[in-house]
Amino acid sequence: MDHTTTLTHRVNASPDKVWAVISDIPGSAATLSGVESVQMLSEGGYGEGTRWKETRTMMGRADTVEMWVSQAEPPSPTRAGTTTVKARQSGADYTTRFILAERDGGTDLTLTFGAQVARPTFLSKVLLALVGRIGMSITRKALTRDVADIAAKAESL
């Protein structure tokens, strides 16, 4: 079973500034209101293989998830920037993809989030059918807040 959601936010800042915010994993707890803390697991700058643990509170419960960058292409004058972040937890694979497209001196920031259960059992299929839509609604609200936080930070640079 696969659940996805996509949202686009207009940012009044260049793709380079938006990229600087997205790729600042150590600073993300200060930027994203939904993130409590970040623990880096790899050294060096942002790129494929960068790993960290991120703690968020959702539905009143703090949860820590290990995340990693699976793809990263900074924006350039000839192409949009893209990056993909992955996580795996409790039998589900999570993928978050950002696309940063320059438009009229600003950036259209598109975020696509997907969750897929690796080996769904009959019970997990039933549970996802019952609560999957609610879970994606809660996730979409959190992602909408994240994108607004990213925009605000990029616009302040």
Image (cartoon, rainbow, N blue to C red):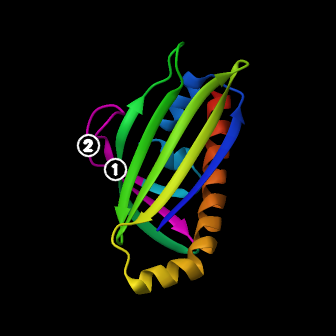
- How busy is the neighbourhood of tag 2: few (under 14 within 10 Å), some, or many (20 plus)? few
> Considering only vertical position in the picture, is 144 above or below 152?
below
Secondary structure under the numbered disc 2 in the rendered image: loop
Left or right of residue 44, residue 143 in this image: right
Identify the amino acid type marked 1: Trp
Residue that mark 2 sits on: 42
Q: Position of residue 20 (x, y in %)?
A: 50, 29
Magenta region = 38-58
Q: Position of residue 104 (x, y in %)?
A: 73, 19
Residue at 65% in and 47% down = 7
Secondary structure under the numbered disc 1 in the rendered image: strand
In reply to whether residue 118 is colored magenta, the answer given is no
- How busy is the neighbourhood of tag 1: few (under 14 within 10 Å), some, or many (20 plus)? some
Q: Residue furthest bottom?
A: 123
Q: Looking at the image, which is closer to me, 84 or 37?
A: 84
Left or right of residue 7, residue 37 in this image: left
Q: Position of residue 87 (x, y in %)?
A: 37, 56
Disc 2, disc 1: CB below 8 Å? yes
Q: Which mark is residue 117?
A: none
Q: Residue 23: in sight, yes or no?
A: no
Residue at 58% in and 71% down = 135
- Mark 2 and mark 1 lie on one chain; the one further toward the N terminus is 2
Residue that mark 1 sits on: 52
> Considering only vertical position in the picture, is 29 above or below 131?
above
Identify the amino acid type marked 2: Ser
